[in-house]
Image (cartoon, rainbow, N blue to C red):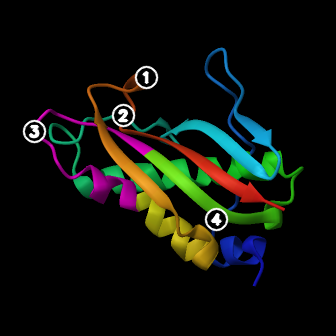
Amino acid sequence: MSITEKLSELGVTLPDAPAPAANYVPFVQVGNTVYVSGQIANGPDGFIIGKLGADMEIEAGAEAAKTCAISLLAQVKAACGGDIDRLVRVVKLTGFVNSTPDFTDQPKVINGCSDFLAEALGDKGRHARSAVSAASLPFGVAVEIEGIFEIA
């Protein structure tokens, strides 16, 4: 099953790749490697704002991380000239969680992204990863995730 077919089966339509919010490019391609800039949690009603350990639960943070996964794939699709099926694999993710100093479940939050990628991409979605705390993130969002991808 192609990536496009699997996403459709999951009820996911990739949006247009989000535009950068500052002076940077959304992705850089070097050979067959695509480095995608940090994608922030953004849902149908706008930015997903919150601080884990204060006003947001782990499950809501994981859902925010899933929106980052969808934005990451949208950027990869743009890097592939509109053909997401050129994606060979997710290589590495770095996830940042807007959290209180005593919050220690960053991996559970970033699992929202990792779990979605594994479900949507199978073995292509399995990756190396870091999940770290941040005192704050742009616009007050709960999660930001950047990624490295291999494409054909």
Q: Where does label 4 land, which residue?
A: 12
Q: CA distance from mark 3 to mark 4?
A: 34 Å
Q: Considering depth in this image, is 11 or 1 the residue closer to the camera?
A: 1
The mark found on residue 84 in the picture is none
Q: Earlier in the sequence, mark 2 or mark 1?
A: 2
Q: Is residue 108 magenta?
A: yes
Q: Where does label 2 land, which residue?
A: 49
Q: Considering depth in this image, is 52 or 102 the residue closer to the camera?
A: 102
Mark 1 residue type: Phe
Q: Where does label 1 land, which residue?
A: 139
Q: Earlier in the sequence, mark 2 or mark 4?
A: 4
Closer mark to the observer between disc 3 and disc 4: 3
The C terminus, quarter of image: bottom right
Q: Earlier in the sequence, mark 2 or mark 3?
A: 2
Q: In the structure shown, which secondary structural element does the residue marked by tag 4 occupy?
A: loop
Q: In the structure shown, which secondary structural element does the residue marked by tag 3 occupy?
A: loop
Residue that appears at 70% across and 73% down? 8
Mark 2 residue type: Ile
The image position of residue 135, as x and y in percent, is 26, 26
Q: Earlier in the sequence, mark 3 or mark 1?
A: 3
Q: Residues within 10 Å of mark 3 (few under 14, many from 20)?
A: few
The mark found on residue 102 in the picture is 3
- Above or below: residue 54 compared with residue 61: above
Residue that appears at 19% across and 38% down? 55
Q: CA distance from mark 2 to mark 3?
A: 19 Å
Q: Is residue 123 magenta?
A: no
Q: Earlier in the sequence, mark 4 or mark 1?
A: 4
The image position of residue 141, as x and y in percent, is 39, 32
Are circles 3 and 1 on residues that touch, CB within 8 Å?
no
